[in-house]
Amino acid sequence: MDTNLPHSYSRQRLRAILIASSAATFILPFIGSAINIALPLIAAEFMTGADLVGWIPTAYLLASAIFLIPFGKVADTIGQRQIFLAGILVMAISLAGAAISPDFWVLFVMMFIAGIGSAMIYATGIALLTMNYPLNERGKVIGINTAVIYIALAAGPFIGGIVTGIFGWRAVFALAAAIAILSFIPSVKDIPTTDGNGRLAGNYDYPGSFIYAATLIFLITGLSLIPKWYGGFLTAAGTAGLITFLWWEGHVQNPIFAVRAFAGNRVFTYSNIAALINYAATFAIGFLLSFYLQGVRGFSPDFAGIILITQPAVMTGAVIFSGNLSDRVEPWIPATIGMAIVAGSLAGFALLGTETPLFVVMAILAIVGFGFGIFSSPNMNSIISALPNHAAGVASATAATMRVIGQMLSMAIAMMVFSIVIGNVEIGPTVVNELLQAIKICFSAFAILCGAGIWFSAARGNLRGR
């Protein structure tokens, strides 16, 4: 195994690349976690129900999922740096637009555009690191980069709660836009130019991109509208689209989704499935607990943010530890332990009541954070390292796609349950019991889902010595 640096960059330059990449990566989870705190106030201002306002973060995730794989392919073609920098600019402009949105649907569109920018960053961020760091250090730098994500997740509820409580929800988007602009400066300065393979044009899989986008739109929209007859129809159409997409990608010459990379590669396949399940089971925690703390318990946004900071704060330490650990032991071991811890914690959340002590809520959040942190870095290391270096963009985009699709499925399940149990009514004292019931049903479903993911994590096999 060659452990030499793949380029002649000094250690100082490599650290600068890591800092620049991590600075831009910070924006994406920050805005996602900060929005969760602001959602009850957004729903109140635009007079929408919890199921409809859930489309604000879902629009962001939907666009990310649609464009992640195409941008991963484009980045491999024209260079990672160009796509990465463009993504930061798109994020800055769209978040500024979200801050001045006059109504719900303008905010929805701005968040969709922000999702496109996030796809450009997600598709290239990890690839920029793995292209410049040797194999025996990837676990460490991936762990650091992932820790930045969880620092942002921790800062989001805390800062978002304070900003929302003092200045209103619009200030959250303005702050995120400012962070995006500031992160652009070191990224331009420190990230080296990357050359693509120059092959796109007529070889690009345009039909595959269209089928992929339509599949996600039908599937996620259908799940969120499942109580209505056309919700089932859209879900069925999305399922058929998924089957068609996988078949098409397996036969086309230049696929946007590397289906062939899954064939015969058990580590890559099962690691991606484990990531998908884990994110599907955990992403909506912030959404659900934001409504639990503010809608059921009546706490303020800033106080709710302080409570929610527990999970990502613990994640940050756990993910650094597990990143280093995955360089020394087989990644499936810590990842599987982490998945099991998360499953048990979600089952604990399913027992929440109107008077559950806050220290119990915070304790469960801490355990979830520890389990997710132990799972995340080793699993990402497995995905990235299971493919050769020249496919770094594909591996990075695929991993990010599993994450975003999992997050989107998590929100779709939550919105589906809210729509069935509560309906599209404004959240208030008259629906507290129904709101609590919907939250508990969601956590029960997520615990079962995460339990199923334990098998895929454990069964992936060894990364080294294959």
Image (cartoon, rainbow, N blue to C red):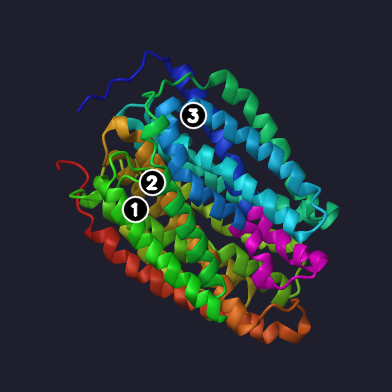
Report the residue marked by disc 2: 398
Q: Secondary structure at mark 3?
A: helix
Between 250 and 114, the one nearer to me in the picture? 250
Which of pointers 3 and 1 lies earlier in the amino acid sequence?
Answer: 3
Residue 6 in magenta stretch: no
Residue at 38% x, 55% y: name it: 275
3 vs 2, front mark: 2
Residue type at tag 3: Leu
Q: Are marks 1 and 2 in contact (CB under 8 Å)?
A: yes
Residue at 66% x, 51% y: name it: 111
Q: Are marks 3 and 2 in contact (CB under 8 Å)?
A: no
Residue at 83% x, 54% y: name it: 102
Residue 278: x and y in percent read 41, 61
Magenta-drawn stretch, dominant element (helix, strand or loop): helix
Q: CA distance from mark 1 to mark 2?
A: 8 Å
Query: As drawn, is 52 to the left or to the right of 220?
Result: right
Determine crowd level at label 3: few under 14, some 14-19, many 20+ residues with C-alpha closer than 10 A.
many
Is any part of residue 321 visible from this angle?
no
Where is residue 296, by image quadrant?
bottom right
- In this rendering, is residue 347 above or below 81? below
Q: Quadrant of the N terminus?
A: top left
3 vs 1, front mark: 1
Report the residue marked by disc 3: 18
- In this rendering, is residue 427 above or below 172? below
Residue 334: x and y in percent read 32, 54
Query: As drawn, is 96 to the left or to the right of 69?
Result: right
Residue 48 in magenta stretch: yes
Report the residue marked by disc 1: 272
Q: CA distance from mark 3 to mark 1?
A: 24 Å
Q: Secondary structure at mark 2?
A: helix
